[in-house]
Image: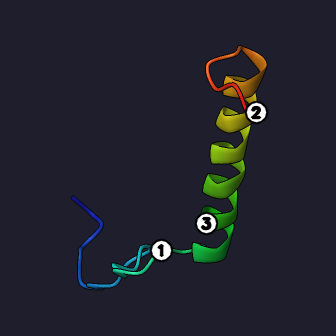
């Protein structure tokens, strides 16, 4: 092979943190709200 793997970092960085934690939390919160509204609409939950 002509390409050598001398650069240990390369194109990807191995980080243990999420890249967009705020965006992930907000999207999961909106998804949970969507399921709640769907459950109310289909009379699974009767408020």
Q: Residue furthest top?
A: 42
At 61% from the left and 54% from the top, the residue drawn is 28
The residue that label 1 is drawn on is: 18
The numbered dot on residue 37 is 2
At 61% from the left and 19% from the top, the residue drawn is 44
Element type at mark 1: loop
Closer to the camera in the image, 13 or 47? 47
Separation of residues labelled 2 and 1 (CA atoms): 28 Å
Which comes before the other along the chain, label 2 or label 3?
3
Q: List x then y, in percent, for residue 18.
A: 47, 74
Element type at mark 3: helix
Which comes before the other along the chain, label 3 or label 1?
1
Q: Residue furthest front?
A: 47
At 42% from the left and 81% from the top, the residue drawn is 17
| Left or right placement of residue 14 versus residue 31 in this view | left
Separation of residues labelled 3 and 1 (CA atoms): 11 Å
Q: Are marks 2 and 1 in contact (CB under 8 Å)?
A: no
The numbered dot on residue 25 is 3
| Left or right placement of residue 9 versus residue 46 in this view | left
How is colour applied across the structure in the image? rainbow
Q: List x then y, in percent, for residue 22.
A: 65, 75
Picture quadrant of residue 23: bottom right
Q: List x then y, in percent, for residue 42.
A: 71, 14
Separation of residues labelled 2 and 3 (CA atoms): 18 Å
Q: List x then y, in percent, for residue 14.
A: 33, 78
Element type at mark 2: helix
Closer to the camera in the image, 20 or 5? 20
Q: Of discs 3 and 1, which sits in the foreground? A: 3
Picture quadrant of residue 2: bottom left
């Amino acid at each position: 092979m002509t390409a050598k793997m001398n650069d240990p970092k390369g194109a990807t960085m191995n980080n243990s943190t999420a890249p967009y934690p705020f965006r992930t939390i907000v999207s999961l919160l909106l998804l949970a709200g969507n399921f709640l509204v769907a459950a109310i609409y289909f009379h699974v939950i009767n408020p």
